[in-house]
Amino acid sequence: MITVDWKPNRFSPVPIQKQIEQFIKEKIVNGEWTIGTKLPSQRALAQAFDVNRSTVVAALDELTAAGLLAGNTGGGTRVINTTWSLLASVSPTNWNANVELGIHPPNLPTIQEINHAEFRSGIIRLGTGELSPSLLPASEQMQQLFARQAARPIPLGYQEAKGDSFLREQIVQRLKKEGIATSPDSVLIVSGALQALQLIAIGLLKKGSTVLLENPSYLHSLHVFQSAGMKLQGVPMDPDGLQAELLPAYQKQFKGAILYSIPTFHNPTGNVMPAKRREELLRVCDEQSLPIIEDDVYRDLWLDERPPCPIKAGDKNGNVLYLGSMSKSVSPGLRIGWLVGPQPVIERLADIKMQIDYGASSLSQWAAGEWIASGAYDQRLAVIREQLRVRRACMLNALERNCRDLASWDYPTGGFYVWLRMHEAIPMKTLFDRALSAGILLNPGHLYDRQEFGALRLSYAYASLEELQQGIAALADIIRSLGATGRT
């Protein structure tokens, strides 16, 4: 589905309807909207243009009569471009057919809506899994980092395949404090943890294999493994995390090739897997020869006490691939993450990464290395933790005031998320749509578990304190309007 970021000029002598017609016609003439392109709904266009729906209907009718558009019952309006004045000497390429043939599936429709709505003004983002801009390092802090740098020259060329050696050394030193013994040769710098998953999918796993993971899981909201021809299979969780004792049966039934787990401040539930369960999980996976991807990007965001050591800390057989990142803890814009694993695996994936992008940003790697080495990273983490504690308290208080009779939730000890579980079934798509119309953006539970239609992933990391209070109060009102009577 295409997006529209243009509005008619209300001060122009040209009627608004004609401006809309000309806008759409120019998109077609210039080849931006090709044959087969589906236009947003009339309601969505009216909202985007900030006009009455009748104005949009009239404009579309004119363009349909001119042979540029066609509408089908239930199928929306599409570009057909049949007029002689717009036809070239050869038929225009139907790019939509090519788009549909691509091997990477599109985002889920709700994810696409979320991605578009996140950048609309006036939206309260109650589900966004990233730090608020107010919690990111101030520009002057980064400028000071660049200004006082004298020991190492700023790199502007390509780095070696595994990434900047100084940054990898800094990561190794940090991992030692978490009980992980490794060396720079076993560390690969990636452009965010998501790229590490993509490299694993295309570099280590066979097409048709199965990735086992917690249910629910953040990974269900992506197509990183499915686009490489793999399947996802959820394994049930309990309050201590993934139920390790079930893995042998699941691996036998689904022929699991690898296990993906977020044991620390799980996304979306916020759970923390206790040390004993981590030991059990590693033991079972070793016995089953089931490799593990440990996604630990939230580790540094503990709010009450440090979480247990990573699963990787107990790995003596090289069975765990460990993911870390600065995206959740300091700056998503740096696009710096790391993958730790057996050296042959790291070299294999480093070779693939060089074929894809010839390495992560040299400047970002340099900044990340200096940020860690100077102590600024840990200083910033202390500030972020304190701010997240305040935000967590604000969200939990708002939930207690407004939603105690409507839903239940657990107390998060770190990370970003509260997993809100409704007491009564409500139509979640309707909830999402009504909330968005009211300026509140939600992350429904079915994004993380296809069968979950009674939960929301809430985040206290992005919205302001005022927005958290307003948004949750409004959310509770919408839930009640949908027929949830609550219970006491």
Image (cartoon, rainbow, N blue to C red):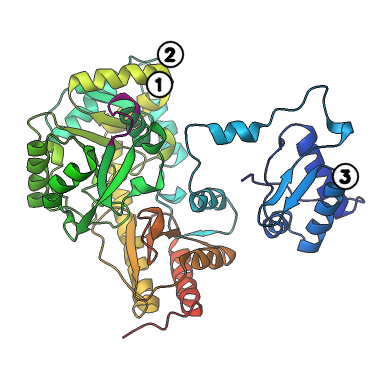
Q: Tell me if residue 465 is in the magenta stretch.
A: no
Mark 1 burial class by Cα count in 10 Å: few <14, some 14-19, many 20+: some
Mark 2 or mark 1: name the one nearer the start of the chain.
Answer: 2
Residue on which the image places disc 2? 157
| Horizontal arrangement in the rendering, residue 367 relative to residue 467 (left or right) | left
Q: Amino acid at mark 2?
A: Gly
Magenta segment boundaries in residue numbering: 202-209
Residue on which the image places disc 1? 362
Q: Is residue 357 visible?
A: no
SS at mark 3 in the image: loop
Task: Pick whichever, 353 or 391, lies toward us.
Answer: 353
Residue at (69, 48) in percent of width and height: 39
Residue at (36, 61) in percent of width and height: 452
Q: CA distance from mark 2 to mark 1?
A: 7 Å
Residue at (28, 35) in percent of width and height: 209
Residue at (30, 29) in percent of width and height: 200
Discs 2, 1 touching: Cβ within 8 Å: yes
